[in-house]
Image: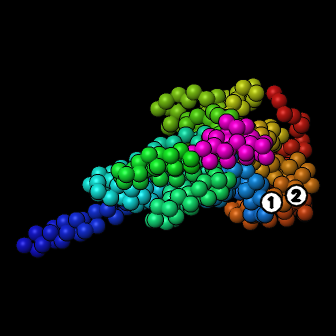
Amino acid sequence: MQQILFLMKIRQFINAYWQQLLLLLMAVAVFCFWGYAHPEKVVAREAFQMFLWNGDYLADRMAVPGGFARYCGEFLVQFFKFITLGAAIYALLFTSIMWLSWILIKRALPAFNQTVLLVLSFLPSVFLWYLACNMDVATTLQVAVFLALALMLALPEKRFMNLICSLVMIPVGYWLIGPAVILLAFYHLRWLRDKGSRMRTVLESTAMILLLASSVIVSSKFVPYSLEELAKGVDYVMVQRNKYGTDEEMKYDYLLRLRNWEKIVDMSYKEEPKSQACRNVVLLAKYYTKRCSDDELKLSLQHPNRVLTSGVAAMMMSDHYLHMGFTNMSQRAAFEVMECTSNYNKSAREMSRLVETNLIIGEYDVALKYISILQQTLFYRNWATRMKDYAMHPEKIKENPLYGPLQKIYSETVDMFFL
């Protein structure tokens, strides 16, 4: 009897809160996907940007259409350095988009079945989730859609005031969040439910689209971006695509950062890696697990030009060369990463590598330059401050268990970039 009562209570609870439970289910699914199924993509996004906490960085973003959305997106991505935080941010973002979509759809179609509308509200989040799996699609896009939905939610309910606010929000919103503000024009079509003013509604929505097009054209006269890029959205999608690297490279890079040598070797046995950079990492893992000799490991030093085929490959090889004691080759690979990001960001991860290599080779002023930049970040600031002590007191480098031996090796070998 108690079990029956318990089951009835559960059923009543589900019936009362099924909408909220679906939102929770969405959040859990997104969190598990990014936190456990694809953590390598979370950390890869953070690795290709450097968010600076200063006014110049904000001003640089706000000087371009869609800059506020980009600034907010990059603000969130800096937390992706920690996978749990990154997965939680994605879960909150996609669930919020779903929740806003649900509210707006209910307002637009109040006579429709609420269950059907709730199912429809999943579609924008699921589509943006799918796009987020592509490294060439920036987090700016998801943030821009979220902000556009929030603007739509803030519109007055009365039609005339709604129209006035929409006409003001479209040019202003375009400069803040980019072309995602076109959702306001589409949302205005909800007034088509009024049979007597359908032609008026179409004309008003068309006027909004033309206003947005005019905003794009005018902005092209003031910013150094093509009309096509401004129409697509600055930093919505990368200008130069397919520069980050393959999924395989991101997985091996993630394991290399963890120094999970056994997992690297096991993964290579299951499927032979296609990328030369990944094969070199496998050799390093086999060396650390005593499955290959020094001579076999040296094979990974051949033809560095053929290995640095993508941003992630260059990141892996920068780590790989430093493990082997080739500081200048590690530095060269780090420079490749710094210049290959297709949206012209810098990489805080590789800038920290440049600090290390310049400390090792004795270029302390150069190291201090990079340290001063990293001190304006959130999660690299403390590390940079510790490195500043080494740059100001070079004699302490000899006492460091990593940099001391590498500096000794560098001072006793030929200075080289290529083999």
Q: At 46% across and 61% down in the image, what residue appears? A: 159
Q: SS of the residue at dot 1? A: helix
Q: At 49% across and 66% down in the image, what residue appears? A: 156
Q: Nearest the camera: 183 or 75?
A: 183
Which residue bears the numbered disc 1? 56
Give x and y (percent) for residue 140: 61, 50
- Residue 393 quadrant: bottom right
Color style of the picture? rainbow
Question: Does residue 303 show up?
Answer: yes
Question: Does residue 96 show up?
Answer: no
Question: Which amino acid is tagged 2?
Answer: Leu
- What's the magenta region? 209-233
Q: Is 3 included in the stretch rendered in magenta?
A: no
Alpha carbon separation for disc pair 1 and 2: 20 Å
Q: Is residue 68 left or right of residue 361?
A: left
Location of residue 27 with respect to 42 vertically, above or below: below
Assess disc 1: are there few (<14), some (14-19) or many (≥20) residues with their C-alpha within 10 Å of its C-alpha. Answer: few
Give x and y (percent) for residue 98: 43, 56
Quadrant in which the N terminus is drawn = bottom left
Task: Tell me which secondary structure the magenta stretch mostly adopts.
Answer: helix
Q: Is residue 238 left or right of residue 18?
A: right
Which residue bears the numbered disc 2? 368
Q: Is residue 369 left or right of residue 118?
A: right
Contact between labelled residues 2 and 1, with CB atoms less than 8 Å apart: no
Give x and y (percent) for residue 127: 45, 44
Quadrant in which the C terminus is drawn = top right
Q: At 41% across and 51% down in the image, what residue appears? A: 197
Q: Nearest the camera: 29 or 343?
A: 343
Give x and y (percent) for residue 337: 74, 41
